[in-house]
Amino acid sequence: MNRCVYVSMTAGMALGMAYPAWGHDVSGAYQLSRDGSAFVLEFFFDDGEPATDYVVTVRYGDGEQASLGRVDAQGVFRFRPSRRSACVVRAEGGGHGVELAIPEADIAAVMNAANTVATPVAGAVEVSPLRRQQPFPLIEVAASVGFVGLLTLITLILMRLAGRRSATVDPNQQSLLREVEELRAEVQRLRQERVEP
């Protein structure tokens, strides 16, 4: 194989293996509002940045589904359930999606505090400690870089071995080379005899 193939293979594998370290997953969490009358849902990326402008829907246990609205600029959405049934709240946007399952006991607690229709609650919402900034994924990045280094080393070794193999001649080729050299010598001798009378 030539060098371009080895370099291309190494680069492709390196990028493929390093990609997970660059991942950007979205997570979510919920808690009760201060007065207990609504749920405060927070959606955020692994680095703690808010997942903004996501579309929020709810699906109750009986299959009813409703669109609730959009997550705000802080990654926060507040809502009150419309029925006493466990539900799944889903936020989608930017090619990502996350679901939060809310058990019936939590639904009942909110409905006891305020029995209203599922609508976003207006007003400023403080960002709670649910959103924790994730540390830099040093181990994943180091592992990816180490793997890339290992692939590069393997590629260089294979390139060196391929170069040695092409430089070595097998016994059949050696005998052919000897015959070619003998024929060259014979042709040279015949040319000299022609020139010398």
Image (cartoon, helix red, strand yellow):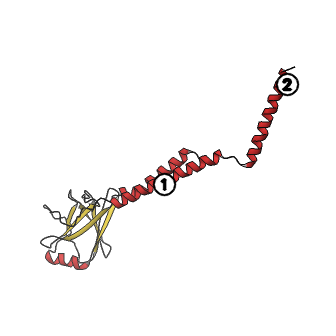
Q: Visible in this render: residue 16?
A: no
Between residues 117 and 143, which one lies in front from this camera angle? Answer: 143
Report x, y in % for residue 167.
Answer: 64, 45
Which amino acid, by three-letter code, is at mark 2? Glu
Between residues 106 and 146, which one lies in front from this camera angle? Answer: 146
Report x, y in % for residue 6.
Answer: 53, 48
Q: Would you name the residue on which mark 2 appears?
A: 193
Between residues 151 and 105, which one lies in front from this camera angle? Answer: 151
Report x, y in % for residue 59.
Answer: 30, 70
Say above or below: 114 vs 14: below
Q: Visible in this render: residue 156?
A: yes
Q: Residue furthest front?
A: 196
**Residue at x-position 52% and y-position 50%:** 156
User: In the shown orientation, is residue 133 left or right of residue 20?
Assistant: left
**Residue at x-position 79% and y-position 37%:** 182
Distance from Cα at disc 2 to Cα at disc 1: 60 Å
User: In the shown orientation, is residue 50 left or right of residue 13?
Assistant: left
**Residue at x-position 21% and y-position 62%:** 76
Label 2 crowd (10 A; few <14 / some 14-19 / many >=20): few
User: In the shown orientation, is residue 184 left or right of residue 95?
Assistant: right
Q: Would you name the residue on which mark 1 appears?
A: 151
Say above or below: 191 vs 97: above
Label 1 crowd (10 A; few <14 / some 14-19 / many >=20): some
Q: Earlier in the sequence, mark 2 or mark 1?
A: 1
Name which quarter of the figure residue 77 lies in: bottom left
Which amino acid, by three-letter code, is at mark 1? Leu
Q: Residue furthest right?
A: 197
